[in-house]
Image (cartoon, rainbow, N blue to C red):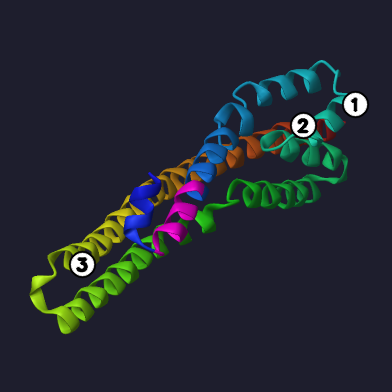
Amino acid sequence: MLAFIQTGGFFMWPLLACSILTLAIILERFWTLRKAGVAPKDLLSDVLTRLRDDRMTLDYIRSMQSKNGLASIFAAGLLNSKHGRHTMKESVQEAASHVIHELERFMNTLGTIAAISPLLGLLGTVVGMIKVFAVLMESGAGNTALLAGGISEALLTTAAGLGVAIPALVFHRFFSRRIDELVVTMEQQSTKLVDALHSDRDKSGATK
């Protein structure tokens, strides 16, 4: 591996750094963007059951507030539910914006790596070809070893740049799609919670 990097020249080192960073981001995003962690399937039903049975406590809300994803959005809404539908919706939207910001963490970095890695590879290719032409000017076409070294450096950096960029781009698209799905799910669940709380209160108010 070290010989491969050394053969590719200087630009293999930033590409190696990009590949390590890409792998770290991919593993972290796989863990963070789990649906069970961001938007648990049974969370809404559990909250509604507690509300219906009058078992919703401040401690339970605080425990949700300390979590990430949909739980923190629900906590923000429940803490402000007594101030009316409009205030509750605003608090839910504010909490959701923070959650979405966390979901999108490192996505710009991953997209940047996908964009610059081929350029780094291309730059290494250009430098390698410059070396080839320098050898041709000094020694002619007879020094095949030096020519092969320059061509090898050019090809290796191109391959390495594409090898880093392609997975980075694929997973950037994959995680972007997953974030969109999670955001839609959280919006639907939050709307159901707001509607469930305030439709019940509207009915009780109308009855009185």
Looking at the rendering, the stretch of residues picked out in magenta corresponds to 10-20
Residue annotated with mark 2: 203
Instruction: Please tell me whether mark 1 sits on a helix, a strand or a loop.
Output: helix
Residue type of the residue flagged with mark 1: Asp
User: Residue 171's spot in the image, x, y percent?
Assistant: 42, 45
User: Residue 34's spot in the image, x, y percent?
Assistant: 56, 31
Q: Residue at x 15, y 79 (%)?
A: 139
Q: Residue at x 28, y 73 (%)?
A: 126
Residue annotated with mark 1: 59
Instruction: Please tell me whether mark 3 sits on a helix, a strand or a loop.
Output: helix
Farthest residue, direction top: 53
Residue annotated with mark 3: 146
Return the residue nearer the eye: 132 or 198: 132
Is residue 94 positioned above or below 65 on the image? below
Is residue 172 positioned above or below 53 on the image? below
Residue type of the residue flagged with mark 3: Leu
Residue type of the residue flagged with mark 2: Lys
Give the alpha-carbon distance from disc 3 to disc 1, as whole Å. 72 Å
Numbered disc in front, either 2 or 1: 1
Q: Residue at x 73, y 47 (%)?
A: 95
Give the alpha-carbon distance from disc 2 to disc 1, as whole Å. 28 Å
Task: State yes or no: residue 17 in magenta.
Answer: yes
Numbered disc in front, either 3 or 1: 3
Return the residue nearer the eye: 56 or 65: 65
